[in-house]
Image (cartoon, rainbow, N blue to C red):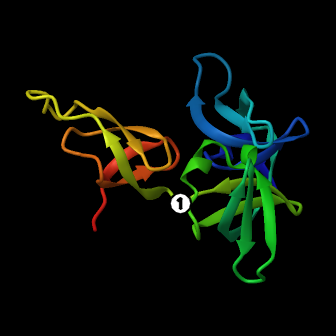
Amino acid sequence: MKINGNAIRPGNVIEHEGRLWRAVKIMHTQPGKGGAYLQVELKDIRAGTKLNERFRSSETVERVRLDEKEYQFLFADGDLFTFMDSDTFEQITLAEELIGEPAVFLQDGMVVTVESYEGSPISVELPETVIMQIVEADPVVKGQTAASSYKPAKLSNGVRVMVPPHVESGTRIVVNTADASYVERAKD
């Protein structure tokens, strides 16, 4: 589907220079001289490389529609992850590169969204947050209770995360899967 260059929005997938790109950030720019344009930060879906590109409203780009399907995570074998289609029970195995850093947060039975283009999976989207248990946390330092002070902690999957001083070992917390950041204490 062709769209104007100024109609690109964050999250859109476009075909540009023979490759698929996801728009990460956009910024409308109107210089004093010349026409307005849209400055777009693009990320290559397959290779992960980034590109900054300018699009004028007079230009058209090809917006690509991806097929989205929910799959259930079954198990990991090295850097290969196996998922099952909940409707057909068909299983697919995907490489860790396709999932990226959030792969460490995959849990048995977790439902993920697999995006594919022309039948080929190109990305895996995990739920926005997961509940994890802290297995190791530094003790609270007296007098260091300011709201902005955080301390390092280790999650049950080995990932290190910064948590508020009141969070102790054994506590279950909500973690953002995109950047491995503390969200809140889990409600039990």
Residue under numbered circle 1: 127
**From what the image shows, is residue 89 above or below residue 66?**
below
Which residue is most to the left? Answer: 143
**Is 45 positioned to the left or the right of 170 in the image?**
right
> Is the N terminus in the top left, top right, bottom left or bottom right quadrant?
bottom right
Return the x and y of residue 101 as percentages of the image width and height.
61, 42
Of 69 and 157, nearer the camera is 157
Name the residue rendered at 18%, 43% in the picture: 166
Name the residue rendered at 74%, 63% in the picture: 82
**Is 144 positioned to the left or the right of 51 in the image?**
left
Return the x and y of residue 80 as percentages of the image width and height.
76, 53
- Name the amino acid, label 1: Pro
Q: Quadrant of residue 140?
A: top left
Of 75 and 71, nearer the camera is 75
**Is 129 positioned to the left or the right of 85 in the image?**
left
Return the x and y of residue 112 as percentages of the image width and height.
62, 64
Name the residue rendered at 68%, 63% in the picture: 75
